[in-house]
Amino acid sequence: MIRPVPLPPEPPRGPLWQTLAWSFRPLAFMAHNREQIGSAFSVRFLGFERPMVMVSDPAAVKALYTERRNGLPPGRKFALEPVLGPRSVLLLEGEEHMARRRLMLPPFHGERMRSYESVVGEIVTAEIDSWQPGAAFPIHARMQAVTLEVILRAVFGVAAGPRLDRLRVLLRDILAETGSTRRQLLGLVARRRGSDPLEGVRERLAAVDELMFAEIAEHRRRPDLAERDDILSMLMTASFEDGSSMDDKELRDQLMTLLIAGHETTATALAWTFDLLLRHPVELGRLRMSLEAGEEAHLKATIAESLRLRPVVPIAGRRLAEDLVTDDLHLPAGTDVTAAIWLTHTDPANYPEPFAFRPERFLETAPDTYAWIPFGGGVRRCLGAAFAEFEMRIVLREVLTRCDLRKLDPHPEHTGRRNITFSPRAGTPVVIESRRPARAPALA
């Protein structure tokens, strides 16, 4: 008789306590479990039939992400499908997922990606020009405005119009409503009761769909569709290996995925980076000196260190297609498993002084591939990872060379939840102490 493989231990309290701890104090919850149980532990959340095993050892993370047949756990569909739609690349599996990934990857890499540099520069310059010395505001909200504008321009290829103006407002409202911890908890309760977890935003989602389909129809009427370089045109003219292409409903789901995931995560990463830099003046000074000298290595290292300490997406799970076995762990097929990204990034075995903000560590030696995973890994690694870092470099360079900022509260930001992301709870409020004019372009 084959004996069942036991899962790693759970915290001593039940699903309600675990759900509340994960919702309101996620970092403390994970750190406590690591300290009391070890690098692998099981958690049970309200609304889910199975426990989720969280792992943080790079060997376990590698085994999880390199098995291409592993599927998605149900939590991702529950959290994302009502907004993104059932055909979102984030929710498809197997060959369906890979086929869409191949079509959607090119704009976010290489020369196609770098062609958006002037667009990002224009948008962040206009944003900075609107900041008045002495003004105070949460910089997270301003970064959301910048990154939403960037992805709108990249996706649709136009800067203005009544349809896009309305879309901006609706997307901000939907993110604010669906991203709150309260809404997520209400959604879990609604799921248990069989009611609609998005009852309050259905009308706005329908309005977004109407705008999306109108934009798709207008694109289809363009005589120059094949020559355009916006992402929507590229998706409309691209074909899968069997010669088929995306229909309007699928185009809507992929556009919604790009608009939501393509701006919210980058904006949050920027807000965390400002929080860290403004609390570490020595590191801020070093970065500014390198930027004035026209160097980028320190900027890239700063972004890498920020993403290490404050990964925006805390977990990226799979349902095991076969047993996961390492020297210290044996998990049976069918188990829901996730990398606990923040735990991997703050393990002293991976990073000496794990809670210190030291960008230079990324100038010294490159970390193990599976010890730095802010974008997940394997065949489901974030499509826009390179684009996000590219955009962050442009925004940080412009803001830090033109503005002197000060945090309103010198203490570290508390971690809040916005849907599947960890964001600064107060939005990183800053004061603009001074602002310099934009540099004039060099004459040819």
Image (tube, grey):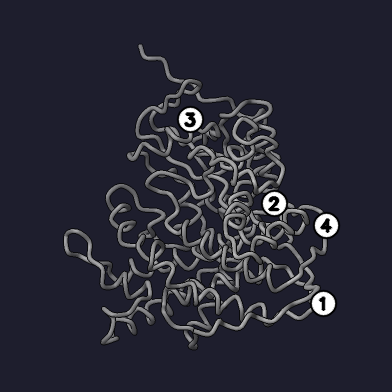
Corner quadrant of residue 121: bottom right
Residue tagged by mark 3? 59
- Front tag of 3 and 2: 3
N-term-proximal mark, 4 vs 2: 4
Q: Earlier in the sequence, mark 1 or mark 2?
A: 1
Q: Earlier in the sequence, mark 3 or mark 1?
A: 3
Residue at (58% x, 35% y) in the render: 43
Looking at marks 3 and 2 on the same chain, the residue that comes earlier in the sequence is marked by 3
Residue in the picture at 58% in, 25% down: 9
Q: Which residue is mark 2?
A: 415
Residue position marked by numbered label 1 in the rendering:
134
Q: Residues within 10 Å of mark 2 (few under 14, many from 20)?
A: many
Secondary structure at numbered mark 3? helix
Q: Callout 3 environment at 10 Å: few (<14), some (14 to 19), or many (20+)?
A: some
- Residue 253 showing in the rendered view: no
Label 4 sits on what residue type?
Pro
Badge 4 is on which residue?
410
What's the CA distance linking mark 3 and mark 1? Answer: 49 Å
- The amino acid type found where label 3 is placed reads Ala
First in sequence, mark 3 or 4: give its number.
Answer: 3
Please, what secondary structure does the residue beneath circle 1 have? Answer: loop
Residue 296 x/y as whole percent: 57, 60
In the rendered image, is residue 295 in sight? Answer: yes
The quarter holding residue 294 reads: bottom right
Q: CA distance from mark 1 to mark 2?
A: 27 Å
Residue 65: horizontal and vertical position, in percent? 42, 39
Residue type at mark 2: give it.
Thr
Mark 1 or 2: the one toward you: 1
Comparing 434 with 74, the one in front is 434
For marks 4 and 1, the one nearer the N-term is 1
